[in-house]
Image (cartoon, rainbow, N blue to C red):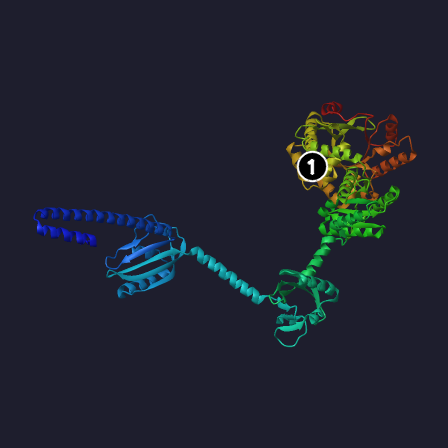
Amino acid sequence: MIKLGRIDKRLAFVVIAICFFNDDFIFGFIVLINLILIISLIYLIKKYRNLYKLSEVNKNKYNLAIDFLEAVLWEWNCETEEFYISSKIKNLLSIDKEEIKLEDLFSYITQEDRNELKLFFDEMIKDKIIDSFSLETNIINNLGQRLTVEMQIRSNFRDGVFIISGMIKDITAKKQQENINKAIENKNRLAVEGSKDIAFWWNVRQNVISLNKRIREYIDFEGEKDIIISYTKWRSYIYKDDLAEYDSQMMRLISSKTDEFYSMEFRILTKDNEIRWLESKGKKTLEKNGDVFIFGALSDITARKEKELENSFLSYFDEVTGITNRRYFIKEVGEYIEKNPKGSFAVIFIDLDNFKFINDTYGHDVGDLLLVEFTNIINGMKIENSLFSRYGGDEFLLVKYNVIEIEDLKIILDNLIKELSKPIAINDIEVFCTLSIGVSIYPADGKDIGTLLKRADMAMYLAKINGKNRYEIFDMNMLEILNREFEIEKRLRVALDNNEIKVLYQPKIDTETEEVLGFEALVRWNCKALGMVSPKEFIPIAESSGLIIPIGNYIIEECIKKCKELSIKTNKKFKMAINLSDVQIRSEKILPFIEETLEKYDLDASYIEFEITESVIMKYPEKNIEKLKQLKKLGVSLALDDFGTGYSSLSYLRILPIDSLKIDKSFIDGIVIEEKSEYIIDTIIELSHYLNLIVVAEGVETKEQYDYLKSINCDLIQGYYFSKPLEFIEAEKLLL
């Protein structure tokens, strides 16, 4: 129905009135009415169009709000049994379709929750119960994931139809966090209940301290509840040596103008007259009324402090020997330099030769006992103004303060070498423990402990490669020598790959017939970068670096191969002598390698002789004699090289499984020059023949030497008098 305003009504009335007076106006009236109706209709159409647009906008906003909502909306019509659910259900259940039935939704709910929830729904529908509620349940989606969801449900009548609607929200992450927080809360509660800390507060202005009842375990108070005492009384329990420091820290804390946390440690004397360590942690607060409160807790840290003291000992003292360690040494000497910049002292770096072999041979227990005995020997020397420390492993440090004359220092070093030149008895085992020693002097060789240690270590290394059982005092020329050593080691690592290592053969001559009866294999190295390098220079480096193993294996195989070639060309019996180093003797792989190589070339072992120096054997005679016996079982011959230069006992000659003995060149050089050398040689030959040993004199260079050796029945000689070391082709011609 069209509603007219006041002006419209008046206008209509006037028009009607005029029409009563004039029939011509009837037509005009009808036209006017139609015009009014048309105008009203246009107005209404425009109005409803705007309302429609507004409803569409609101609908879009509503749909947009649903999309942004992190929940699934749903609705069920009891009359039509239509079920609507929003598209978010796809993400929640990991499904592709949007339209699902109410029964489908129930199928995703876990078995333990499904029946109860469905029964609740059935009761609500049956009795048309109007209510709203929220519950949590679990679902399992199509990916097999178990999720916790919150279901908000509301029922009502709409236009006489019973409608149930609601919202489903994934709260899995929330529940997990709640569970974590609950677990943390429970643990914190248990931690508080199980804590042995003593809670306290202190009103500084009122001079009142309250401590909980656990303090009774430490101080003698009647009753079972918390105690309240004065600060003065509390101070009486603090250990007297800590009281001044305690008061100082408390005064600083109290006088501070701000709230602050604090932590301090002190000791108390308990009711049982025991000293216990306490740690006090807390906070000082300034109250509005001017009071100063300190809140905190006391923890018994006695066990920790005792462990710290133990660790402090271990951090500065060696556990095996009981003497100070490297950390203490560096700290002590560093402090000495700071306090005495114009002083002087020597840093002595000591290394026990072949300590690893002792460990490997007799076990680490014997090795540790050796370190202890060595320490006792050094301490027994009572070196004044000194500090003796273990650097680590088999290395020790000795600092000698106030060194004025270098000769005085050399006396100490000579005594060190002398004291350790004697065998040390450990568990009925005699071991020899020679020393390699390096020395640096402050301030000439360095003005800080780091530089002094480095240069003493360099000098020690040089002593080791120069033959061990000696000392070297650092000088700047050593840098050049050591650079040479490092360069040799670097080049030696690729020498075999570059075919730079070769074997020469020096003939051994029968003194009666001057016939060649064998050869000694001698290694030579012609380095592409360094040129010819002497064996005396590179062999010690090869031994210390372990490179002697691959180089030695190459020489053994090369000699066995050449022996095989010669054995095919002649019926002569001859021997090829190969040197074995200390490192090779210690290797567990040497025996299998020799045996396998002999089998590889099908060579009779009697063609091969291994030479071992006297000093190598006599360091650990029991162990090495057993190794020699194992070599002998392979069928090879054994020779004792450099006889007379070591420190062996002659009694060992009767039990050594050797076939020949080689007199060192140093004695040969004395022939015709000094009678003592001749007498020693004569005695060695006579003794050797008595023991059925073949005697070889090495380093024979003159006719006089040859004639003398022949006259005293020396069996074989080798040296430049007859031949220098030869290439294999030349050596072969001599033999054939």
Closer to us: 263 or 95: 263
Tell me the SS state at disc 1: helix
Position above or below: 488 against 21? above
- Position of 119 with respect to 443 (left or right) is left
Position above or below: 267 against 585? below
Closer to us: 54 or 601: 54
Q: Residue 132 sits in which quadrant?
A: bottom left
- At label 1, counting other C-alpha atoms closer than 10 Å, the crowd grade (few under 14, some 14-19, many 20 or more) is many
- Position of residue 736 measured from the top left corner of the image (x, y, whole percent): 74, 23
Q: Would you name the residue on which mark 1 appears?
A: 549
Closer to us: 301 or 609: 301
The quadrant in which the N terminus is found is bottom left
Position above or below: 504 against 57? above
- Position of 440 with respect to 9 (left or right) is right
Q: Is residue 597 visible?
A: yes
Residue extending furthest toward the left: 23
